[in-house]
Amino acid sequence: MKKILVTGGTGTIGKALSISRYVQGYEVTIFSRNEHDQVEMKREHPYFTYIIGDVRDYNEVLSATRWMDYVFHFAALKHVNICEEQPQEAIKSNVLGTMNVVNACVEMAARMVNMSSDKAINPVNVYGATKFMAENIVLKDRFTNIRSGNVLWSSGSVLPIWKSQIETDNCINITSSEMTRFFVNKSELIKFMWDKRDESGTFTIPMKSFRLADIAKEFIRLFGDKKTELNIVGLRPGERLHEYRDDTISSEENISEDLNYIFND
């Protein structure tokens, strides 16, 4: 039976891959540093192997990679503001951590798939820069990078944050009425990633672009009431108005009005 290691396996994408139909018939090992999340996930999915570990520690990564056929690398610091405030931590996790996974996969003859971001394209913040550097480390050994925009309803993403804001303060905060972002749902991303797992290179999943103000107004209609406020709070350090699908196509140029894509996921 083939074996798969999932770093950051208790996160939204790691968990989605681990329970997907694509890995049926594989032995799955979850590698992450959050003990609480592993305990919670193990209650629901006791048939996986669970390892507490940190991608910053090469020996831990090397040990976990032994006998693996594939390593799907999702462990990262991903919040733009945190990476801006603590760039040294972003480098340790996103750059050096990825280097550890690459080196372990080379040593153990495992195939690596790295989760990257559209923020790695023409990066303007620490997070994007670390993801860009990680991509180049992965390509050095002819492994796979998958670039994605915002994953719908993932932990820490804008939709669950807005829901919490409505529940606590009956408001939604957005940075700019003109801001656009690419979005993709989990099932599309997992399929794309699985299909590309044996190909060398950097691949960007096809994505829909949306204006955040449009999503916010529909969000209020669905989850708020007549008193729910929409607040414009301004760009945070490291943020830009529009992300890129590649070096030439920005989300500003591909705005979709299909809000059913957002709310029917």
Image (tube, helix red, strand yellow):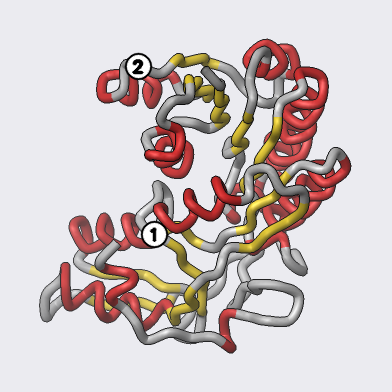
- Residue 199 pos. (x, y %): 71, 48
Left or right of 19? Residue 105 is right
Circle 2 crowding by C-alpha within 10 Å: few under 14, some 14–19, many from 20: few
Residue linked to disc 1? 152
Nearest the viewer among 9 and 195 is 195
Q: CA distance from mark 2 to mark 1?
A: 27 Å
Q: Quadrant of residue 246?
A: bottom right
Provide the residue designation for mark 2: 47
Residue 59 location, quadrant: top right
The quarter of the image holding the C terminus is bottom left
The residue under the point 60% across, 55% down is 80
Instruction: Say which label, 2 or 1, has the lower sequence index.
Output: 2
Under mark 2, the amino acid is Tyr
In percent of the image, x 71 and y 60: which residue is there? 120
Q: Return the x and y of residue 40 as percentages of the image width and height.
A: 31, 23
User: Is 92 located above or below residue 133 in the figure?
Assistant: above
Q: How many marks?
A: 2
Foreground mark, 2 or 1? 2
Specify the amino acid type for callout 1.
Leu
Which quadrant of the view contains residue 54? top right
Q: Position of residue 194 (x, y in %)?
A: 55, 46
Q: Is residue 219 left or right of residue 3?
A: left
Point out the residue furthest to the left here.
226
